[in-house]
Amino acid sequence: MTTSAIELENVVKEYLSHGEVVQAVKGVSLDIAEGEFFSLLGPSGCGKTTTMRMIAGFEAPSKGLVKLHGQDVTNVPPNKRDVNMVFQSYALFPHMSVWDNVAFGLKQRKTPQDEIKRRVGEMLEIVDLTGREKRRPREMSGGQQQRVALARALVNRPRALLLDEPLGALDLKLRQAMQIELKRIQREVGITFVYVTHDQNEALTMSDRIAVMNDGLVEQLAGPREIYERPATAFVAGFIGTSNLLAGSATGGELKIGGGRVLVPGHEGDVRVTVRPEKITIGTEEPSNGLSAVRGTVAEVVYLGTYNSYAVSLADGADATERSEGANQTQHGNRDDRAAARGGTIITVFQQNALD
Ligand code: ATP
């Protein structure tokens, strides 16, 4: 059995705001394994930073327990917890060199000189900053500063590292490069990483598991593939990637919609079905049996470089307008679907995930 690095048991955080009690976290339970890259993902205000701050000890839960490596630390101050935190702002000492920034914590702990030399040297090598020891933070790029912050947080070998939107200040290209770097560093040092982000791609790229949060609660906790392929709720489906949401009443394992049918085996009554755009094929012929298909008209085609995005209005009038707004899109490679592009009637075939 793998050891738990971090456990939250039914953690609630309440704040008093203008005389009213606000619940920032409404009852979150998590079990993060030793060595895991774990992300808290969700929109602004969903409670991810508050959850992270309770793990670090900067906030005390109003209810519930926080455990680190099996020990209840709910009332233990941050400096007595074996975790470190990296912030978006890096919080480097501007007047100190890279070397001194990284060595700071070890010096504070009166670590012997030769050990400081060895550990700082090793850490700078891991974050790929060997040769830049004498630089000041202002002489470095954002990505380099972030790596100094990382080295400084890792050099005293915490058992877990908490990272709050650490790449938020970087431009897209650098952020993508740093995502891969961060994952490499995490593997190399083997430390548990808890990562807070509102960026779904970032979470999907780096994480072993993701907790998707919404309004103070965890809506789904699973690996990136499962979160993407089998979103547990409509919120998760909508928040991660592009998704089409079809809703209606199913009978006989079928949802009649858009002049066609969507197969929902085992589901009766009200259902919501989410379909990823890349699972959809646009065509002009009836599909063979056993496939879901709806009819509609291509309302818009947008060229997006590596794929085209099709917005399709479904055939049945009633709620077609509602659904045509960015709904029912498909993305695919270099297909040249002239009939579709002309706005002719089309048939859409897809594999779908049924929601409970
Ligand atoms: P963001 O991505 O914007 O940082 P978040 O998901 O990290 O958002 P939190 O910072 O955890 O969200 O905040 C969750 C909720 O709790 C928000 O509605 C916020 O306004 C509220 N909140 C957070 N800190 C306090 C506080 N000290 N006093 C009152 N309300 C707070």
Image: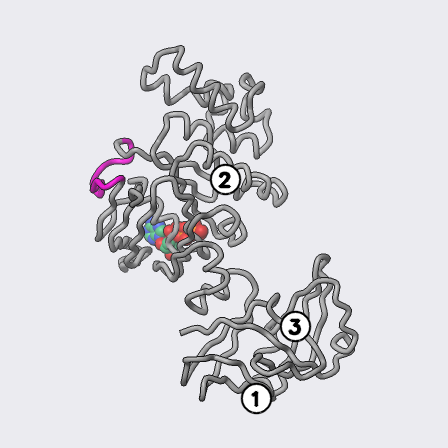
Between 288 and 187, the one lying in front of the other is: 288
Q: Amino acid at mark 1?
A: Ala
Q: Are marks 3 and 1 in contact (CB under 8 Å)?
A: no
Classify residue 229 as left or right of residue 337.
Answer: left
Q: What is the distance, in whole Å, between disc 3 and disc 2 at their CAs?
A: 34 Å
Which residue, given by chain and number where applicable, does mark 2 sit on?
183
Q: Which residues are magenta?
A: 69-79
Direction front: furthest residue: 289
Location of the C terminus by quadrant is: bottom left
- Secondary element under disc 1, as helix, strand or loop, is loop
- Secondary element under disc 2, as helix, strand or loop, is helix
Image vertical order of residue 244 relative to residue 199, above or below: below
Q: Position of residue 98 (x, y in %)?
A: 51, 21
Which residue, given by chain and number where applicable, does mark 3 sit on?
281
State the residue at coordinates (70%, 77%).
Answer: 283
Is 209 one of the magenta-colored residues? no
Indicate which disc, 3 or 1, sits on the residue closer to the N terminus.
3
Indicate which disc, 2 or 1, sits on the residue closer to the N terminus.
2
Image-quadrant location for residue 71: top left
Location of the N terminus by quadrant is: top left
Q: What is the distance, in whole Å, between disc 2 and disc 1 at their CAs?
A: 48 Å
Any mark on residue 114, and which?
none
- Tag in front: 3 or 1: 3
Indicate which disc, 3 or 2, sits on the residue closer to the N terminus.
2
- Tag in front: 2 or 1: 2
Counting every numbered tag in the picture gives: 3
- Secondary element under disc 3, as helix, strand or loop, is strand
Q: Position of residue 294 (x, y in %)?
A: 61, 82
Any mark on residue 318, and which?
1
For label 2, the crowd category at 10 Å Cα-Cα, with few meaning under 14, some 14 to 19 and many 20 or more, is some
Image-quadrant location for residue 287: bottom right
- Tag in front: 3 or 2: 3
